[in-house]
Image (tube, grey):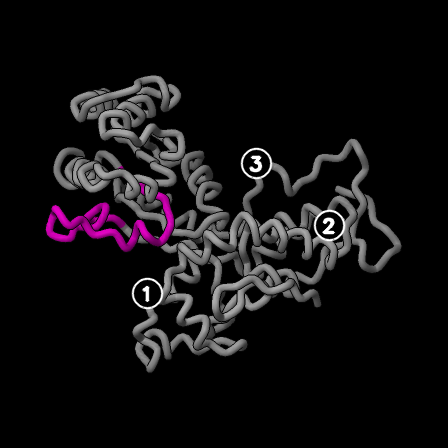
Amino acid sequence: MGSGTTDGNLLVIATPNEQNPFLEGSLFVGRHLVMARLRNLIHHGQSLILIGGRRTGKTTLIRQLAAATVERKIIATDVAGWDLSSQASGLGALRSAIEGVPETRYPSGTRDDVVNGLNRLTDCALFIDEADRLLQADWGSSFFSFLRWMDDTCYRTRMSIVLVGGPVLAQFRDPDDRGSPPLNYAHLEFLEPLDLLAITELSSSLSRPMDSAVLLLWTGGNAWLATQLLSLMWQGSDFATAAEAVHDRAAMQVFPIWEKQAGLQCLELLREMPKDGVEKGRLMGGDLARYRSSARSGLSVGVLRMEGDRFIPLVRSLSWTGCILPPQCP
């Protein structure tokens, strides 16, 4: 842990030999109830669709799930490493993952290759990260049809399929298969921002932990924003300097993607929403009920957060039109 300073704004100053805890790949806080629920579902062979925006902690969560004891053979693959030029190349990547080799090992494959590989295993869990990328391929619908067949008919509870991606994955309906979703009977889980307890746990590695409520307010509970900000503060930056630097990074790397992932209806909700947010009841069945699904997507992406029974916009970073605002530091 970094050593303390006498400057009230500088929380820590790292020494050269110390490892920045906020850069550790194994860093994981909060979401313990979500972990327990999803682990139990996977243990019993239930398939899942995990939805979250960019840099919200989806991949970290599924790594934790893959490392958890679920009494199943874990097969993990990331579509970002697949060749999406044809369905055969996609099946080759999936075959590679099943055999435990890099996704580039087999340049092509067949459905028989995949099934034969799975048949050699006992109960298993197949994790497919960045699964929404499959929707960019013209054969994506056919691939999801194959996954549904394996999930519904071929393996059922002998295999749990875990698809991970942005809100577009939850919204997908197969036009060639009576409007079927990616998986017919999967549990749909929207990943929500970190809560105050998780933010407190995350910030505890600072030698003089900052006010967790302030950190939650500024980051909206977004895991990436919080760890980036705390990493800079651990190295010696004051809050204002760290917040400005993180905002500049996010403006280029994250915010434009959040806007696309949130969707037009969610951005419309943000424009209508006052700074202090709206009560949950208005979105669940009141005068703003038409935005109910958009609010859920907004939570998973990171443009909204929950505070008690209110949906609050992340006004520190986004304006009502989706444009970027300068950060406002407490």
Query: Which disc is residue 25 wearing?
Result: 3
Packing grade of label 2 (10 A; few <14, some 14-19, many >=20) is many
Q: Position of residue 106 (x, y in %)?
A: 30, 18
SS at mark 1 in the image: helix
SS at mark 2 in the image: helix
Q: Which residues are magenta?
A: 160-186
- Is 188 left or right of 310, judged from the image as shown? left
The residue located at (37%, 31%) in the rendering is 77
Residue type, numbered disc 2:
Met
Q: Earlier in the sequence, mark 1 or mark 2?
A: 2
Question: Could you give the CA–CA distance between mark 1 and mark 2, rounded to whole angstroms?
Answer: 36 Å
Question: Could you give the CA–CA distance between mark 3 and mark 1, rounded to whole angstroms?
Answer: 32 Å
Determine contact: label 2, label 3, CB under 8 Å: no
* Residue 320 is covered by the magenta coloring: no
Q: Can you identify the residue that label 1 sits on? A: 293
Q: Earlier in the sequence, mark 2 or mark 3?
A: 3
Visible in this render: residue 121? yes
Question: Could you give the CA–CA distance between mark 2 and mark 3, rounded to whole angstroms?
Answer: 18 Å
Does residue 105 sit above or below 152 in this rendering?
Answer: above
| In front of the other: 284 or 266 | 266
SS at mark 3 in the image: loop
Q: Quadrant of the C terminus?
A: bottom right
Q: Position of residue 143 (x, y in %)?
A: 21, 36
Residue reaching furthest to the right = 6
Q: Can you identify the residue that label 2 sits on? A: 233
Determine contact: label 3, label 1, CB under 8 Å: no
Residue type, numbered disc 1:
Ser
The residue located at (11%, 51%) in the rendering is 178
Does residue 81 sit above or below 169 in this rendering?
Answer: above
The residue located at (45%, 44%) in the rendering is 61
